[in-house]
Amino acid sequence: MLPRALWLSCLLAVARAQSEETTATPSETITAQDGVPTSLDVTYASISTTITLLPTAGSLSPTTASNGNGTALSTASGSQTTEDVTLIVGGQTTLSSNGTMTSSGATSRTSTSAAPVNTQPCNGHVEFCERKYSNITYVAAHNSPFSRPGNAASNQLLPVTSQLNDGIRMLQSQSHFVNNTLYLCHTSCDILNAGTLEDYLRTVTLWVEDHPFDILTILLGNSDLVSVDNYIAPIQNSGLWPYLYTPPTIPLSLPNWPTLSSMILRQKRVVLFMDYMANQTAVPYILDEFLHIWETPFSPTDPTFPCTVERPPELPEEQARESLMYMANHNLNTGLTFLGNEILVPNVARINQTNAVEGPGSLGAMAEDCTDLWGRPPNFLLVDFYDAGSGSVFEVAAELNGVAYDLECCGLIEPAAQAPRRPGVLLAAMVAGVAALLC
């Protein structure tokens, strides 16, 4: 194992090198938690009441504003418009209850043929099409944007497009508000700055546009607890906004989520949650995470991964069982103390076992424990380095979903042109990479 002093020196070198490269000048400091504010910093909304939105809620008329990421293109106002529904099947054919089929060609006849059977997969499986969004287990990439080679604070090896191509269906991230712009940074922008939220969402939008039969979930961590209004501009400027799902009620309880096919037909295929400071009455397409999802202990360092409720705190057991989806945080961390602050980084030495299908501390074991304890599988499996195990995390999800997983995993990082780096930056990155492998 690498001596702790050398490890800390490596991490400090990377932090200094990266702070020289970024144009942001962040003011935040490293905190003891990986993006989780203390109970004194935040409050959790009550789920004792339900607000019903207008029946046509789902698309909002944009108006000009300027928030969040430089010059905004638009924000959402409270006016509502009716959604257009585009069917997957071609033509304009209807089938009456007595079997008489009428087509757009004005020809009627009696059909004795069997009803058509859907063969178009939804999220990769035909079986998912008529299943509710809340009745599926999705593999989630913990800190999805943080895939920078050679940085010990990275949580993923492959970039977001590869993550999505391989089957990741929830993207989780931390965001920090620096110089009036939302950046994706790991704990502090001095440690790892993955660029702006807008650029990241623009990449995600391109994938969404190219995959019209897939449902994606995004979970944004509002690490600096800024107003939700700051997120409107980067979301709209990225092009993601037209695909965002708006629920008919606040909150939307577990049994009331739509099926994947209905979301696909309406092209509302992205569900966006925010952990803190969401305000669905003002921005209805940014959903309050803890009104809809509870989580097991976040940034766990316990390899037994207890399947207990940590957030929201004091959630009644009945609501946890019957009203909310839940996320199993299955990413093992190790804590390092630096200048009086605790830094949590992935425990890469145990990553293969952590992501394994079976065995002590494995994802499969935690999923089984959670299912036994709560009577249903987790909805989201949040993992580091999802590619470790060559698809084992997807095997676990497939078993929970009752489907087969027979794909090859996982994608390779394609070489990309990069700007020349100063020798000191390269040395710091290489030393940190060696430290991460040996720790």
Image (cartoon, rainbow, N blue to C red):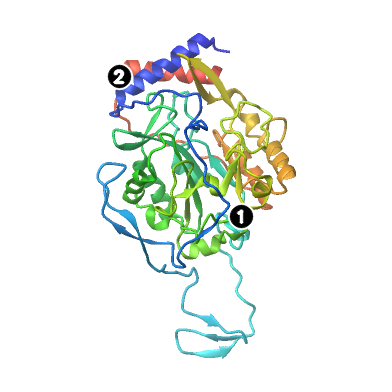
Mark number for residue 422? 2
The quarter in which the N terminus is drawn is: top right
Q: In the rendered image, which quarter is residue 326 located in?
A: top right
For the C terminus, which image quadrant? top right
Horizontal and vertical percent position of residue 196? 34, 38
Name which quarter of the figure residue 56 lies in: bottom left
User: As shown in the figure, which amino acid type bears the numbered disc 1?
Assistant: Leu
Provide residue 114's location: percent of width, then percent of height: 64, 78
- What's the residue type where badge 2 is placed? Arg
**At 33% across and 22% down in the image, what residue appears?**
19
Q: Is residue 213 above or below residue 300?
A: below
Mark 2: few, some, or many residues within 10 Å (few <14, many ≥20)? few
Position of residue 80 measured from the top left corner of the image (x, y, whole percent): 38, 65
| Residue 167 appears in the figure | no
Which is nearer the N-term, disc 2 or disc 1?
Answer: 1
Secondary structure at numbered mark 1: helix
How dense is the environment of label 1, judged by Cα within 10 Å: few (below 14), some, or many (20 and up)? many
Identify which residue is drawn at 44% across, 69% down: 86
Q: Give the residue at the far right of this rendering.
A: 372
In the shown orientation, is residue 331 left or right of residue 93? right
Q: Secondary structure at mark 2?
A: loop
Establish if 138 lies above or below 57: above
Q: Which numbered tag is attached to residue 254?
A: 1
Q: Residue 435's spot in the image, x, y percent?
A: 50, 17
Q: CA distance from mark 2 to mark 1?
A: 52 Å
